[in-house]
Amino acid sequence: MRNPLDVLHETFGYSSFRGRQQDVIDRIMAGVHTLAVMPTGAGKSLCYQVPAMARPGTGLVISPLIALMHDQVRSASAAGIKAAALTSANDDREETVRRFLAGDLDLLYVAPERASGEGFRRMVDRVQLSLIAIDEAHCVSEWGHDFRPDYRLLRALVEDHPEIPRLALTATADRHTRDDVLAQLGIPADGLILAGFDRPNIRYSISPRDGLPTQLAQIVRDTPGPGIVYAPTRDATEKLAAALATSTGRPTRAYHAGLDAAVRARNQEAFVTSEDMVMVATVAFGMGIDKPDVRFVAHAGLPKSIEGYYQETGRAGRDGDPSVAHLFWGADDFARATRRIADDIGEDRQRSERQRLASLGALVEAAGCRRAILLRHFGENPPAACGNCDNCLNPPSSIDATEAARKLLSA
Ligand code: ADP
Ligand code: MG
């Protein structure tokens, strides 16, 4: 075994571990199953990449998105790690399998549906593993905001190798989801490492929609630097992008899953390298994009959940500089979501979906600190006021109170 700190210096060129990385890595080095819940941008990838390099054998990484895997393989290879992905999009699968069986890989990325298959499992039996990492592990849980049935089947794979340390990683898991992930992946309850969720440099603001194009244009004008506007539909992304380009003169592009893959790649690349672009996108945009200087994230409508909101706003200010997250919502967002729950969702999940919506309602209608509500949602015990959200900076209760007092006095 190598020293993880040497791997950090020599392979990644970083001087020190950040946050709880060291704790997580120490546990995996010691062969202990772990669930790491760390915010977006905290550096979760390093938590499995370093021990995969430091321990003998190949690290298996289960990851839900092909695009994300390919990004990871590219950056790992650039750092000198022997990494490959086994996906339907690879035409070098035979070569990858050969290298895997020969023990010639530090990391093998694989999608959950493949990883849980009988054929793959029998192949893994013939290879020495260093660890099994399950990225975006909230997908294991029906309580998570992005449940994927294939993740449930991973249980068989990890149980084939009880002595190989498992590392489940996620940015977004409330208590319910965390307990479920631990149970599903056979990680003991004391295997949880929970890093702080607070992103103090992000200023949260939430207000009702009232002339959305003008409201968004105001944010774009007030906030220099790259920004993301999340819109609820593909059509809305294109319309808003055009409107913002005209009203603000900022370079603006749209991104959604209905665009040509080549157009999507081009727009994403343009955004990543830009210092002032506004990307108007559906939530299809952002996962796996490593852009540290995003200065604002605006939501044109209600996000799907508090976890989604936290993950999407978390793309702002990864460099630690002041950034803005502004959510615009309308009563119709709630009406639509309620209808969707009644119409499209199986009865077994309706209760959790309703709870999810109620939590969002409490957040957007709150008169108190937004950050406190967010952090409490993730099981933290924050101070009552953060001083860096709309309600802390400009308390609505006092305005309402003066208003009420004025009405009383004039009555
Ligand atoms: P996450 O998956 O938790 O959202 P990533 O693994 O994508 O985060 O890492 C976010 C960024 O932080 C990456 O650019 C990564 O290289 C960087 N990073 C991670 N750990 C360190 C460290 N110890 N020192 C400096 N940069 C780091
Ligand atoms: Mg990640």
Image (cartoon, grey):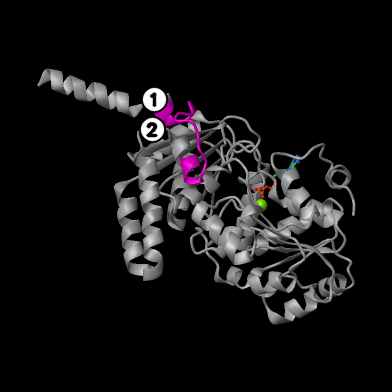
Q: CA distance from mark 1 to mark 2?
A: 10 Å
* The magenta segment: 374-392
Image vertical order of residue 124 relative to residue 288, above or below: below
Q: Amino acid at mark 1?
A: Asn
Q: 308 above or below 250?
A: below
Q: x and y percent of residue 156 in the render?
A: 66, 74
Q: Residue shown at 50%/58% (left/top)?
A: 145
Residue 368: assigned label: 2
**Ligand 1 closer than 8 Å to label 1 CB:** no
| Residue 161 picture quarter | bottom right
Q: Which residue position holds label 1? A: 394
Residue 7, percent from left and from top:
86, 47
Left or right of residue 147, residue 302 in this image: left
Give the image quarter of residue 164: bottom right
Magenta span: predominant SS is loop
Secondary structure of the residue carrying numbered label 2: loop
- Dot 1: element: loop
With 101 as the anchor, is 344 left or right in this view? left
The tag on residue 283 is none
